[in-house]
Amino acid sequence: MTLSAEEIHARDNNLRGALARVRAEVGKSVVGQDAAVSGLIIALLAQGHVLLEGVPGVAKTLLVRTLSTALSLDTKRVQFTPDLMPGDVTGSLVYDAKAGDFEFRRGPVFTNLLLADEINRTPPKTQSALLEAMEERQVSVDGVSLPLPSPFLVAATMNPIEYEGTYTLPEAQLDRFLLKLVLDLPERDTEIEVLRRHALGFNPRDLGGAGVQPVLSAEELKAAQGAAAQTTVSGDVLAYLVDLARATRQSPSVRMGVSPRGATALLASAKAWAWLSGYPAVTPDHVQAMVLPVWRHRLQLRPEAELEGVSADTILRSIMQQVQVPI
C-alpha cells in the first residue's frame, strides 16, 4: 500500500520520536557522550558497524550495553583476549558421539548486536574472523553459508594503539566499520555528574536498577532504516562527496586515500543523519558532519606525516576547507 505524503511525514516523526527515547534511555546511565550516542544511532539507521576508541574507563562498554538494553534486540558480548580463537567468535564444529557426526555449534556472532570488547587485544587472525560476518552478514562453515540475524551490528571497543598489549587492526577490517567514534575524557562538570550518580547508588552492572527500559522494537528499527534510505540526494551533493574523496587521494600526507566503499559509507551516513535531523534531502552540512567519523580510520598516512604528528582528522578538516562547497 502506498502512503500519502502526510502519512509518511507522520510515520517518520513517530520513528524519530522512538529514537529520541532511545537516546533518553542511554542518558540514564551514560553522561557526556552525546556525539557517540548519535553516532551509534546513525550506524543503526545506515546498517553499519561502529568502532569506539578511547582510553579505559570512559564508558565505551557501558554505552553499548545501555544501547542494547534500550533496543528490543538480542545482544551478545565477546571479550577479545590474546588467546581468543576464531571459532570462539563464529562457532565451531563439534563431534556428536550419539549421532556419530560433527555438528556446528553457533558462536556469539549469531545475534543482532555483537559487543566486541577490546577488539585490538586479540591477534589479527581472530580479528579477521569477523570480516565475512560484517560484510556479508553470514558465516561459512564446511562449505555452507549460514545467514546472521537481521538486523546485525558489530559495536567494537578498542584502546589506543599506544597502549601495551594491543594489535593494529588490519586495513580490511577497519574498512568494514562504517564509523570510528573517539570517546575523550569527560569535562570537569561531566565528571562531577558521573561521580554524583555513583554517590547516589548508580551501579553500571545493573542497568535495570538505573531505569533503562527497551523502547524501540526490531520492526520500528527496520522501518526507520527504510525511511532513512529513502532520503534524497541531489547531483551537486553527490559530486561534492566525490570531490572530497578524490581530494584525500591527492593529499601529500596520505599514502592511501578513501576508496569508493568509503564514499558510499559517507553517503549512507549523511542520509541517515539528514533523516534523523528531519531534513527531506542531504545537504553539504550533513556530509561535512559525517566526514571525520566515517573517514578518519580509512586514511593511511605517509610515515613522514605520522612522524610530524599529523592526524587523519587534521587532514580531513583541511580538505573540507579546500574543496568547493555547492551552493
Image (cartoon, helix red, strand yellow):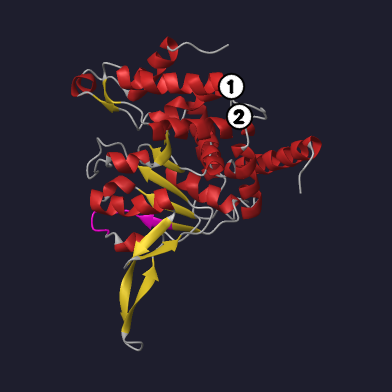
**Among numbered discs 1 and 2, the one appearing first in the sequence:** 2
Residue 51 position (above or below residue 278): below
Q: Where on the picture, by quarter, is residue 303? A: top left
Residue found at x 56% / y 56%: 73
Q: Nearer the viewer, residue 10 or 229?
A: 229
Residue pushed farthest bottom?
98
Span of residues in magenta: 77-84
The reply to whether the magenta stretch includes residue 309 is: no
Location of residue 292 (image quadrant): top left
Q: Is residue 289 at least partly visible in the picture?
A: yes
The answer to whether any part of residue 202 appears in the image is: no
Q: Label 2: state its secondary structure.
A: helix
Q: Distance between the residues labelled 1 and 2?
A: 8 Å
Q: Specify few, some or many for label 1: CA neighbours under 10 Å numbering under 14, 14-19, or 20 or more.
A: many
Q: Is residue 85 left or right of residue 65?
A: left
Tag 2: residue type? Ala
Quadrant where the C terminus is found in the figure: top right
| Of the pair 190 and 33, the residue shown nearer to us | 33
**SS at mark 1 in the image:** loop
Please name the amino acid that badge 1 sits on: Thr
* Relative to 13, residue 90 above or below: below
Residue 275 in the image, given as x and y percentages of width and height: 63, 33
Relative to residue 101, is residue 214 drawn left or right? right
Q: Mark 1 points at which residue?
A: 283
Position of residue 320 measured from the top left corner of the image (x, y, whole percent): 44, 16
Mark carried by residue 260: none
Label 2 CA crowd tier, 10 Å (few <14, some 14–19, many 20+) = many
Determine whether label 1 and label 2 are within 8 Å by CB.
yes
Question: Where is residue 40 shown, x and y percent of the image?
Answer: 51, 40
- Give the residue displayed 29% in from the left and 39% down from the top: 171
Find disc 2 in the rendering and name its residue.
274
